[in-house]
Image (tube, rainbow, N blue to C red):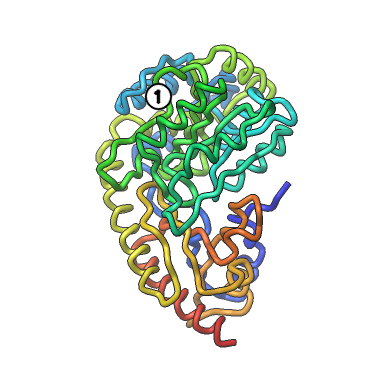
Amino acid sequence: MPSSPIRKLAPLAMEAEGRGVKIYRLNIGQPDIPTPQKALDELKKIDRKVLEYSPSQGILSLRKALVNYYERYQIKLTPDEIIITSGGSEAVLFAFMSCLDPGDEIIVSEPAYANYMSFAISAGAVIRTVATTIDEGFCLPKVEKFEELINERTKAILICNPNNPTGYLYTQREMNQIRDLVKKYNLYLFSDEVYREFIYTGSPYISAMHLEGIENNVVLIDSVSKRYSECGIRIGALITKNKEVRDTVMKFCQARLSPPLLGQLVAEASIEGTEQYSRDVYEEYVERRKCLIDGLNRIPGCYTPIPMGAFYTVAQLPVDDAEKFCAWCLTDFNYEGETVMMAPANGFYSDPELGRNQVRMAYVLKKEDLRRALFILEKALEAYNNR
């Protein structure tokens, strides 16, 4: 089981804070944007006498609210096709455990969200990767690269759209190519779409649920963590029209009894009547993206493509080993009592030699903090390379 590149440097950060150093955390997708007031009010007014188990598939009223939410994106569902999970992470894990046997293979483009590897290991599955490159903006490789990996053990393709860690947004053409592969080889398509609210281009959002002819092959992964800044309530969803998959997922749901009761109440309160909140949050991220990307590309030796979705980017730094540099920023460096924390990107690749000079950065801080973090990063790079 690999360590998370997002959290593996956390002990060094705690030690730095213990020394009084202020840290600008660009390593993790924890927004500083407030949770919707409507959701916080719901939490405060819960007056139940018993905090009981909820149904294993989640509260019906929440699933009905999600049906209305997905309708906004032309995704037509019934409540029975939605299973509430303990965060999007549990949804991925249950999808793997329900659809894959030990030794089965999943094809994933990389760099990829690092915990996919952990979930695959938990399920006894094997991740096979197709590399994308920073020079090509992390666009999807030719479909032949996927097809070269398909064998009798291949059972699924996994995508994250918009992508974490790169911010890449799949085009209609790329989604159609994936659909054709899924259909040709009768594969599952696991589609992590937790960042659909954060798309910064005029191109339409293409969900795996929009793809015709593979409706029974698609398993959608979702979460309220990022769109409502509710990472701590641990509410996600697994969505599929495949009844056999749902029936199998429910066995795992019953084994863990139920998703968090209070989290479900807060999530339900977040869905309706928060449209203005979502618009304001989106506009804020548009500005934060511009602030970070423009600032990064002005630092000598740094380069990052423009991400078209989510709130991450993978950046190339003028260092030979980004993991050592990220650790050094926490152990040996501060500028006026402040430093930066980033996620080394080699942990998002299957081969740790890839992405050695890259980091993933999340633009989840307010613009003033992003500007200060970039200033400190430039000072850190100067000091590191002049040692």
Residue 384, quarter of picture: bottom right
Direction bottom: furthest residue = 386
Q: Of residues 321 and 360, which is closer to you in this image?
A: 321
Location of mark 1 (residue): 211
Identify which residue is drawn at 50% across, 23% down. 218
Using the rendered image of the protein, determine whether residue 318 is visible from the camera's viewpoint.
yes
Relative side of 111 to 367, left or right:
right
Q: Say above or below: 377 vs 155.
A: below
Identify which residue is drawn at 41% across, 24% down. 209
Identify which residue is drawn at 49% across, 55% down. 133
Looking at the picture, how far across and down is residue 331, in whole percent?
63, 75
Label 1's element? Answer: loop
Looking at the picture, how far across and down is residue 180, in whole percent?
46, 26
Q: Of residues 311 and 62, which is closer to you in this image?
A: 311
Amino acid residing under circle 1: Leu
Looking at the picture, how far across and down is residue 18, in whole percent?
62, 71
Identify which residue is drawn at 62% across, 55% down. 347
Say few, some or many: other residues with alpha carbon within 10 Å of mark 1 (under 14 / 14 to 19 / 20 or more).
Answer: some
Relative side of 386 to 257, left or right:
left
